[in-house]
Amino acid sequence: MLLQIIRSVSQVPWPVGCAKLSTSPIFYKPQVAEEVAKLLQLKAQLNGGEESQNANQKFTLKTPKGTRDYSPEQMAIRSSVLDKIISVFKRHGAVTIDTPIFELKEVLTGKYGEDSKLIYDLKDQGGEILSLRYDLTVPFARFLAMNKISNIKRYHIAKVYRRDNPSISRGRYREFYQCDFDIAGVYDEMIPDAECVRVVYEILSTLNLGSFVIKLNHRKLLDGMFEACGVPAESFRSICSAVDKLDKSPWEEVRKEMVDEKGLSGEVADKIGEYVRLNGKIELVEKLLQDEHLIKSKSAVEGLEAMKTVLKYCEIYGTSDMISFDLSLARGLDYYTGIIYEAVLLGESGKGDDVAVGSVAGGGRYDNLVGMFDPKNKQVPCVGVSIGVERIFAVLESKLSANKSKLRTTEVQVYVASAQKNLFEQRMLLCKELWDQGFKVEHSYKKNPKLLAQLQYCEEQLIPLVIILGESEIQKGVVKLRNVNNREEVEVARNELGIELHKRLENYKANEAL
Amino acid sequence: MLLQIIRSVSQVPWPVGCAKLSTSPIFYKPQVAEEVAKLLQLKAQLNGGEESQNANQKFTLKTPKGTRDYSPEQMAIRSSVLDKIISVFKRHGAVTIDTPIFELKEVLTGKYGEDSKLIYDLKDQGGEILSLRYDLTVPFARFLAMNKISNIKRYHIAKVYRRDNPSISRGRYREFYQCDFDIAGVYDEMIPDAECVRVVYEILSTLNLGSFVIKLNHRKLLDGMFEACGVPAESFRSICSAVDKLDKSPWEEVRKEMVDEKGLSGEVADKIGEYVRLNGKIELVEKLLQDEHLIKSKSAVEGLEAMKTVLKYCEIYGTSDMISFDLSLARGLDYYTGIIYEAVLLGESGKGDDVAVGSVAGGGRYDNLVGMFDPKNKQVPCVGVSIGVERIFAVLESKLSANKSKLRTTEVQVYVASAQKNLFEQRMLLCKELWDQGFKVEHSYKKNPKLLAQLQYCEEQLIPLVIILGESEIQKGVVKLRNVNNREEVEVARNELGIELHKRLENYKANEAL
């Protein structure tokens, strides 16, 4: 049995406007660096003997295709986003686990359908045949089955690998982060499912990404709808993948695919078209429960009853304002067995129409995956969500770049400078005292740096406070304390310095923008 | 040119006592799970048709050789350790970066000497030839050269890969964490070097691992010492690797290797023996600066002068009590060009002799590595340290296991329970209110759980507070608040609940043991 378990939110096109990133000075430019390296290499070859001493540099200096380094600025954005996401996961009582970056190839075999060709294999160097993980869900299922765990609520944030043809300019990479939260265990219907939706709601609210909608649907309702429309059972899957395209293509195109490629009659396709145009709230469930065609399907009724339950729970959990019951939401259906959901960011409000900028989270219930790993086929029902952190990083990078915000990549609170020569040991001593008190402190690694250079460094690095040491102050037992922002200076007694620094740093936050 | 750049602290034997881990209930047992899986597989084969329905489970359920999953308990220890280490790095103003898990194979070629055979290669699936990273230092040097960065202070915590023959029982793995802090840039002598030593000092102090010593030595002094003793220049490297064994082997064995295998005369070996037995503080530097043989070597004098400087700076930075200038410290000398250091945990004090339990950090100056990647051979001098986090994790796991400490793997503050049936919507509503206020809250995913089961869960999970909902309390507008530890219950007005919870949780810490 092949499964499509790709949570498609994790690999998404770069949003419009992010192309700007490559011209922003705060981001490294691997492509440029790569080109420069190539040119320098050619030059070295032309120069022959002169450069050939450096026998080690015979190749282009680059990261592998489809991968990149993360600069300090990118890491600052990433940490800030992940910290906020993790605090939501912890608010809901999740533990975290980690699994190896590679698995026995057999573990991944037969789980990803035709996308299996995108799996990275390790070279056979004797011993086991290994592959890099393709997502975090299959390793999670393997972990549950192997350790006989029948209930757990865990998050896992880690890199996964896909030998896709990357289009870096569109933000698609071969190495990228996934960020999953899953609840495994036998529980009462829709209670953990509604909590996953609440987790998505809290994360998107706390990240301040603008307005969003969480679309919900149910696999059983989709199956029942196809049944009611007269789709042959063996075509459910392919018709479903056609429906899945409705977020990118107009109905006319999808209809064409159903009729011309997938052999549906126009009449059946049009019936589907009636349904997939529907979206709403609980009143739509009530309306569909009156639909004479739909209620002939047991599966559809079960799906609708489940939707009713989950929508009620979403009401209690305070998420229903953001929720849309949407019959066009299909996702990777081979994999999901119950509720499915997907969160979509809407454009900035106030700029006219809400324009969808894409999916940033998605998931659903998958009750049959763990059993595939259990020798006795013991099932562990699961429901989970994958946060599309790469897209969220990209949206924030783009936002910061557009604002021309300068990002702090360190948390240094105080810089210790000296105004004259030969005070470096005094500087070191003061740093030591401040480190002992837990302050984040830097000073110049040069013995006799120029005062102006030291002050400029603080302004560039957005360090809020500078202590300036001078001979006369040292003799008086005081230091000069300078506010970098407004350049105001005051004298502070050395023995009151700690208290004064604490007072001034109390409400300081390294990056207001994040 | 081959370099030995293995920071040996990252792969260390499991400390004595850690074998106990595998019998501790808080840790998963992959070996046991693996054996069980094998037996079940055999059973399935014997049963033939009956089990063969489950066509997906044809293989042993395990992680690849030399790797492991990290359980929630292990992750809790890891997070706690890494958070403390990162806060020290941040106190010193470091940024962080990340690099891909694999590099072009050429980047790694010629950097690891005979250990190159331990590099994991990826299968050639068309395109570039790739290898998994072996450490974080070579990718850092590649990053600096590629992005033309001439100064940076960064930390990097990530997994590295070595196809070693793992002896899991001794805690050696093929996939393990490295945790590096490096300062790159042209600065005045020994100022960043002394700060790296200070960073090690702060980390080991804050982790509360018992007493430790940081051994210092200098590459130039070692070279000068060999020169002064009459070792032929071409043998410096092999004699150095013999000296490196002095932390494990007695002098007699090392001498034997020098004479029998490496062709030194007994007289020369004995001269070396005199020196490598020496360790002390600044007075030893002064003494050696009077040594008539040593001071004939320019290299030795330079090394000694540098040691004098760094020991003075260590005095200022308050680390000198923990420092030992140790002439037997050799480390991977092909790689280092200046100061080298290594931190060693001493046994528990008060238990008689201080017994060394092993190296937990090490590093030094390497001024020539970045230039190997630069087309013009432009050097970027670097000094850094690698914290042996895997060994630190193991020491803490062992300690917790010995104490029989139960570790919290979540941070749940409040559990919402119900005393009667049909209150699950009331529970959900209260959870929602508490999540809105930022509390970390869980409740049962079952509609009608038994009260006793709910209270037991809280005791097992060490959740400090439970709110118990009952019909009569709901009608009165109050809740019952129970302290899980002493089982005391009080009634609290629903509208004062937030304040009361804040008050009770003010000084609560999830894991006192960490």
Image (cartoon, coloured by chain):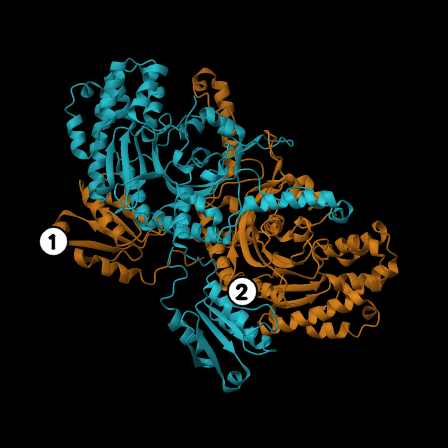
Chain colours: A orange, B cyan
Tag 2, which secondary structure? Answer: helix
Question: In the image shown, does B429 or A186 lie closer to the viewer?
Answer: A186
Question: Which labelled disc corresponds to residue A476?
Answer: 1
Disc nearer the start of the sequence (2/1): 2
Question: In the image shown, does A437 or A191 lie closer to the viewer?
Answer: A191
Pointer 2: what residue?
A: A202
**Amino acid at dot 1:** Lys
Question: Is A291 on the left or on the right of B483, as rendered?
Answer: right
Image x and y of residue A492, in percent: 18, 58
Question: In the image shown, does A335 or A34 lie closer to the viewer?
Answer: A335
Determine the image quadrant of residue B296.
Answer: top left
**Amino acid at dot 2:** Glu
Instruction: Give the residue at x 68% y 48%.
Output: A375
Does label 1 lie on the same chain as label 2? yes
Give the total of numbered labels. 2
Count residues near mark 2 (Cα–Cα under 10 Å), then give few for <14, some for 14-19, many for 20+: some
Determine the image quadrant of residue B215.
Answer: top left
Question: Which labelled disc corresponds to residue B20?
Answer: none
Q: Is residue B347 visible?
A: yes
Image x and y of residue B195, in percent: 29, 41
Contact? badges 2 and 1 (CB < 8 Å) = no
The chain identifier of the residue carrying mark 1 reads: A
Q: Quadrant of the C terminus of chain A?
A: bottom left
Count residues near mark 1 (Cα–Cα under 10 Å), then give few for <14, some for 14-19, many for 20+: few
Give the CA distance from mark 2 to mark 1. Answer: 54 Å
* Nearer mark to the viewer, of 2 and 1: 2
> Is the residue A116 above or below the residue A280 in the image?
above
Tag 1, which secondary structure? Answer: helix
> Is the residue B378 above or below the residue A277 in the image?
above
> Is the residue B239 above or below the residue B489 in the image?
above
